[in-house]
Amino acid sequence: MLYIFYLYYFQYLFGIISKKYKQPKRFKQGQIMKSSNVTVDLDKLEKLLNKVGDMVITNSMMSQSIEDLPLSDEKRELLEKTALFQRHIKELQDYAMDIRMVKIYNIFQTYGSIVDKESTTHNKLVSLNIKGGDTKIDKSMIENLDLPLKSIISNAVIHGIEAPDVRMSKGKSKEGNITVSAEQINEQIYITIQDDGKGIDVESLNLESNAVIENEVQSDDMTIQHIKAIVEKLNGRIEISSVIDEGTKLIIIMPLTLYSKTFRYAKRCF
């Protein structure tokens, strides 16, 4: 009876997946498809991801129950089916996550206007360099980081990069450089903002103090403590290094997605 129950259970779960991910409609030759893109509500996508997490946990429980059964041909067949179902869950999880991911270049390219505006206002020459623009990150994650990144870049122009005559007196080129880069290492995203300005005393930043954010910050003129608080709220961290008269490097290290904890649990189940 237990064997029959498990077979019906797997048929039910496969039915759920097949309904959510049907094969795309085939078009006859000569028929024009107007668009291959659809708008997906993030709330609905999050519900789907949560449901995938439920399936992971349920399948893990089922696998453990099967492991406790006496050795038999039925048990071996059930174990094969659970292994197959695990692969299907992993694929479903990857598909859902891929929908949430966007190229970070889409955000980085908007920062050029900030550099142009601030450098003009403060009579400076500054160029913005973008690296790793093809790196993908969770859309919700980068939306939460947008204001902090704008603030960091704005401050780099205003306070970090020296005026052209000051730079030349230090043996530097008239034009300062700010580089924004992104790189994925394992399940983490490293976002680096580096300038070749005057540098700072890192200890004076008082990074050990914690800023309390009672309301959502709308200004792009944030303190480093506010930026740190936002990053840590997203399970990330900040690393800052600087050399006087050579420049400053700030690295934001974030999980690849807001769902990383769920996915790490899922991988342990697999």
Image (tube, rainbow, N blue to C red):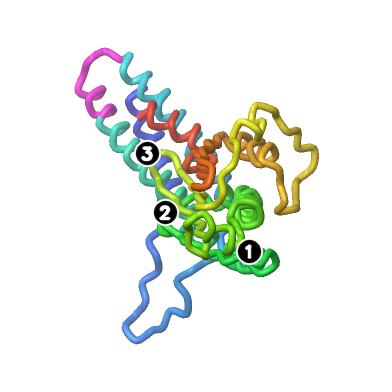
Three-letter code, disc 2: Thr
Q: Does residue 116 appear left or right of residue 175 in this picture?
A: right
Relative to the observer, which residue lies in front, 156 or 99? 156
Q: Quadrant of the N terminus?
A: top left
- State which quarter of the image contains the C terminus: top left
Q: Is residue 49 above or below residue 27?
A: above
Residue tagged 1: 114
- Label 2 belongs to which residue? 135
**Is disc 1 surrounded by few (<14), some (14 to 19) or many (20+) residues within 10 Å?**
some
Tell me the mark number nearer the camera, choosing from 2 and 1: 1
Q: Is residue 175 above or below residue 246?
A: below
Disc 1 versus disc 3: distance between alpha carbons? 31 Å
**Pointer 3 residue:** 186
Q: Is residue 39 magenta?
A: no
Name the mark nearer the viewer: 1 or 3: 1
Q: Which stretch did the figure color magenta?
A: 69-79
Q: Earlier in the sequence, mark 2 or mark 3?
A: 2
Asked if labels 1 and 2 touch by Cβ distance under 8 angstroms, the answer is no
Mark 3 falls on what kind of element? loop
The residue type indicated by label 1 comes to Ile
184 and 240: which one is in front? 240
